[in-house]
Image (spheres, rainbow, N blue to C red):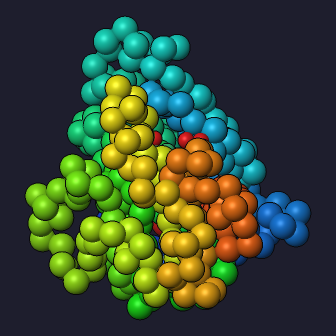
Amino acid sequence: MTDKNATAHKTLRHFLQLTDLSRAELIHVLERARIIKDKFKRYEPYQPLHDRTLAMVFEKASTRTRVSFEAGMYQMGGAVIHLTTNDSQLGRSEPIEDTARVVSRMVDLVMIRTFEQSRIERFSEYSRVPVINGLTNEYHPCQILADVFTYLEHRESIEGKVVAWIGDANNMAYTWIQAAERLGFKLHFSAPPGYQLEAQRLSGMDPTVYQSFDNPHDACEGADLITTDVWTSMGYEAENEARKKAFANWCVDSSMMARAKPDALFMHCLPAHRGEEVTADVIDGPQSVVWDEAENRLHAQKALMEFLLLGQVN
Ligand code: CP
Ligand code: NVA
């Protein structure tokens, strides 16, 4: 008789960072996202995850990540369990290692949104099933998977392109840099003094993949895509007032868009604060693809779940 967990162990893959997938695997998942989206749009049922269960653990708030994983798993024929810190024993100090051992004996896949990357790493170490990073302080790989997929839908190839990141050196920024290295594009980065990328986190990375600019307008020069995010990420709320002052000149507006290529796209992972990191005319304007970007969380993550549970489906 086949042992479910023994089988899972042999092929166990996690998605804790974008770089957990090779370039070829990323390209495969992006292509599967396209095919799976096409089926969805044609109302063609695709349920390869029948009888599989996804547990989602949220230690921070979410709209898009929860809805896309939950809807995606149901659409693929599976079931979902939604846990938060407060409604589970995690909120009463049960060690994450014990939670991992227990939850992963009962489900086939786990998605976690939490604080430190080390917390999801500890969970994965004790998990019998694949673990997906649904956002940590350090990375947001599911979002970047959807963002690259969205770029490809609109512009076919991202190789050799320039993506301008205007804002905080946060989970999104670092994951964009990982994507640039994996997929062969360049990231222009601009943040105010005190909010720069940490050299230590970039060590070992090809330095030609990213370039830092003091002036955000200069970072936008010739860009194919301009993207930004909130000035204050979840977990850093105490810094909100200081950040509002520091980032005041890092609001993506029409003058920044004008420095980019005429057909440049605008992206934001959402939720957005109009009038802070982006003006309303940009996020609600013709170059913005933020709603496609949000929808594509669904399709990209269905492809990711398929890959982690079934391997390379063709
Ligand atoms: N972009 C994103 O991850 O959105 P949520 O916080 O709503 O999940
Ligand atoms: N950088 C943001 C992304 C939210 C989806 C945060 O971590 O809060």
Indicate the quadrant where residue 209 lies. Answer: bottom left
Please name whichever residue, 280 or 309, is drawn nearer the observer in this view of the structure: 280
Give the answer, above or below, for where 124 lies relative to 153.
above
Indicate the quadrant where residue 305 lies. Answer: bottom right
Query: Where in the figure is residue 10, as x and y percent of width and height?
Result: 33, 56
The residue depicted at 42 percent of the width and 63 percent of the height is: 166
Please name whichever residue, 202 or 284, is drawn nearer the observer in this view of the structure: 284
Query: Where in the figure is residue 191, as x and y percent of width and height?
Result: 32, 59
Query: Where in the figure is residue 294, as x and y percent of width and height?
Result: 65, 56
The residue depicted at 33 percent of the width and 46 percent of the height is: 246
Residue 62: in sight, yes or no?
Answer: yes
Indicate the quadrant where residue 299 lies. Answer: bottom right
The residue depicted at 23 percent of the width and 39 percent of the height is: 118
Please name whichever residue, 104 or 151, is drawn nearer the observer in this view of the structure: 151
From the viewer's perspective, is 251 left or right of 263? left
Give the answer, above or below, for where 12 lies relative to 102.
below
Please name whichever residue, 203 or 30, is drawn nearer the observer in this view of the structure: 203
From the viewer's perspective, is 55 left or right of 199? right
The residue depicted at 67 percent of the width and 42 percent of the height is: 67
Give the answer, above or below, for where 187 lies relative to 64.
below
Give the answer, above or below, for where 70 lies relative to 255.
above
- Quadrant for the C terminus, please: bottom right
From the viewer's perspective, is 87 left or right of 291? left
Query: Where in the figure is residue 81, as x and y percent of width and height?
Result: 60, 30
